[in-house]
Image (cartoon, rainbow, N blue to C red):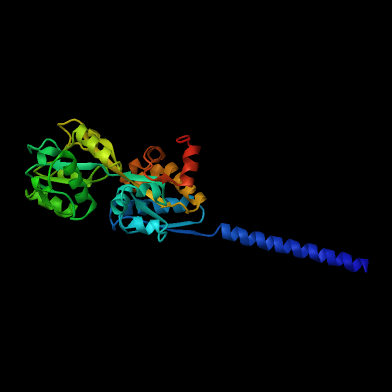
Amino acid sequence: MKRFQNRKSWYLMVASFVILVVVSVVSLCIAAGPIRLVMVGSSSGGTAHLYFAAAAPILNKYIPGMEASASSGGTTENVPLLERGEIKVACVNPGAGMKLYGGDWLKKTRIRTIFAMFHVPYHVVVPKDSPIKQFADLKGKRVSVGHKGGGEAYLFLRILEVIGLKESDVKIEFLGKGEATNAYKDGVLDAMAFLSPLPSPIIVELESHPRGVRVVGLTPQEIQKLVSKYPEYSDYTIEKKWYAHALKDVSDVRSFTEWYYVASRDDFPEDVAYQMAKVLSERHDELVTAFKAANSSTADATAKYPGFQLHPGAVRYLKEKGLIK
């Protein structure tokens, strides 16, 4: 009887051990399971889409189990989709959300910043021999401002309002960048106004055109009025180093910029957000090699210009780096 009880106890011990091993293996398999992540950017070929296309293989390389990919989208359309949890990670910026939902939205949104992607300084370009010296000189001129109803056209109207001009004071052409560049080359336009990462491929292209190109800016007073009324913009100086010819005979140009972010909702897994921030920061050189416009995508920029509230995973990483308290 005693031998039977001992044998029974031994069997129970073995069974318990087997169950424990099985549970452990299953848990490890789950933990090591793939992290399938579609990162939604801008239209195909747009800056945000190209950023995610460059970032995806880097994230996959350095985050165990990560299976990230880039998908096209729209930085304005991404806001409500991300807010509702229909997409997990996307490129968004505060200005798009404030345009959709009003100024108070930024205090209530569930969207959180994982990492700063890039910023897009505002450019106003004119032919090299143009009499236009600053933004206010566009009065009475024919200017391309972006697609009608688009973010760039909306921004141009905001600037007019801030500096005291009316829409009718400028001969506005609602053209996309490609169409506007051709019109500029044909001599149809007096100026082009657009947002672009540095260096702008449009300016690089126009520097070799017979009309040439020169960048003009806003006055410090005009910029202060703009960023005071619309806090999603930041004062910015376009330095001469970016354009060998467009700024050859002038000093650095005062303008403003708008930041875009790798963002998620507040319920996105903290550890995944942490790992993404860490890789994007510590593999910055690889990211810039793959996509030059990511040169400003740094931990320093994320800490200095967070845009939205920081995701807990980003907070954890930035604290480790000593960039925030």
Is residue 135 toward the left or the right of residue 77 in the image?
Answer: left
Vertical arrangement, residue 233 with respect to residue 70, above or below:
above
Q: Residue visible at 7% across and 37% down?
A: 131
Visible residue check, residue 229: yes
Q: Estimate the x, y position of residue 199 in percent, counting from the top left.
A: 25, 42
Q: Judge left or right: residue 264 versus residue 155.
A: right
Q: Quadrant of the N terminus?
A: bottom right
Q: Position of residue 227 (x, y in %)?
A: 27, 38
Q: Is residue 322 or residue 11 the one in the foreground?
A: 322
Name of the residue lying farthest toward the right: 1
Q: How many marks?
A: 0
Q: Residue at x 21, y 47 (%)?
A: 155
Residue 127 can be seen in this image: no
Asked if 318 appears above or below 55 in the picture, the reply is above
Direction from residue 139 to residue 99 in the image, left or right: right
Q: Residue at x 54, y 60 (%)?
A: 33
Q: Position of residue 273 (x, y in %)?
A: 47, 49
Q: In front: 117, or 81?
A: 81
Residue under the point 18% across and 52% down: 146
Q: Give x and y (percent) for residue 142.
A: 8, 47
